[in-house]
Amino acid sequence: MTLPPSLPAHPDPQLDAILAGDLPHELAYAFGGPFHLLLPERFDANVAAFRAALEETGVDGRVYYAKKANKAAAWIERCAVNGTGVDVASLGELREALGHGVRGENIVVTGPAKADDLLRVAVLQGCLIAVDALDELERVIAPAASTRPARLLLRRLPPAQPHSRFGLDDAELATALQRCADAADSVRMEGFSFHLSGYAVQPRADLAGELVELCLKARVMGLQADRISIGGGFAVDYAAAEDWERFLAEQGPADYHAGKSFTQADFYPYHSPVAGADALRAILAARPSGDGAPLADRLREAGVMLLMEPGRALLDRAGCTVFRVRGFKECDGYGILTVDGTSLSLSEQWFDSEYLPDPVLLGAASPRTREPAGGPVRACVGGATCLESDMLTWRKVAFPARPRTGDLLVYPNTAGYQMDSNESPFHDLPLPPKVVVDEADGRIRWRLDRRQPS
């Protein structure tokens, strides 16, 4: 039998140690269904890596965790403890951040066409607000006029994305700057931001360089303008370069269930040569517009603080998702493995794509040690609903043994966007609980996350 191309995730000894013990099976028995494991120490380490990149270049900066990447309270609790900011886009997210101890001054409010109640609370709590439109600016000024000055950034429409909902064009920006100058008692215009798609370094550095120049011009008008936000767009490196290149070269239509097929353009770049905090280093080292001083030098010379809003990058290797095997069915030379959850807990399906890092099979009787029965098998992975499209993995994955009812299937590194972006209690199936895991006195311990799905 020819095995399909594989894409193993980067080795993770800490997670392997957890999975090799009894804990995953005990939790599967206790919950009677799928669950997510969270590793908050990894979150802290990722935040520290971004801060180190700023310190290395002497750039004054601030990291905001993009809360949309994962709903768990554990990350917000860590932000409150270590002073990391939080990026929110709804009143619910703002309340969650405030309720778990994050101060309003450490919150940035983004998202398009913000609701009035969100703006009111944001102004009252002293949050920083990214403004996308002239009417939104007026709605920010209105509550600020009777309470406290509103802190805001004017979001610049990227020239490369003229149809984006996020940002002001040149004419709107000029009008907004004058309005901020005229409403100085109600507004603290602290700088500029942008929302840029993709992970390329140079376009982000180029636009950041433009924002630095805008800050200098805005100061002539008497505005504060001492910070810029470059948003998110920091890739995560899930797999080794050689594994990713081999997978792309070898995968084809025959490797997927039911005639499904994908091209490279359909996939997230699961290997990125410049990822996480290293991507920030590359942006700071890049020369805006390809010449002149590096961005880091320009920021220091202009006295401009650099803000960023990573989500997925702060959750790299900070969690995994565990399903129980319900059944295994033969299908035209390969198998269909059905688990006790749904594809809504692997949200890459939302984008008509695949979450590609290989899932790991844990035998029910003896984790990771069961002797292969009959050799390796190929199988796709379906969910527990009655929809043909409910496939966690369309790809025919190579498993070392035929999966059996009660085995566990672990998808690695799912904390960033996969766990809950698209979750739904379809069929009245319970949403997977989140379990926070850490180590104390040499022992692995766990607790339920303080914000459980409802």
Image: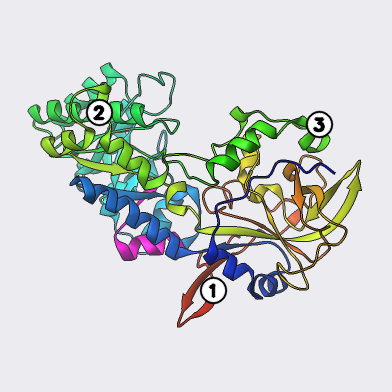
Instruction: Kindly identify the amino acid type of the residue bearing the numbered disc 3.
Output: Gly
Relative image position of residue 266 (x, y in whole percent): 62, 30
Q: Residue furthest bottom?
A: 441
Labelled disc at residue 405: none
Q: Earlier in the sequence, mark 1 or mark 3?
A: 3
Q: Under tag 1, what secondary structure?
A: strand
Relative image position of residue 254 (x, y in whole percent): 80, 33
Q: Earlier in the sequence, mark 3 or mark 2?
A: 3
Residue sitting at x 55%, y 52%: 10
Q: Is residue 84 magenta?
A: yes
The Cα–Cα distance between marks 1 and 3, rounded to whole angstroms, is: 42 Å
**What range is drawn magenta here?**
74-87
Labelled disc at residue 287: 2
Instruction: Kindly identify the amino acid type of the residue bearing the numbered disc 2.
Output: Arg
- The residue where tag 1 is placed is 447
The Cα–Cα distance between marks 3 and 2, rounded to whole angstroms, is: 46 Å
- The residue where tag 3 is placed is 259
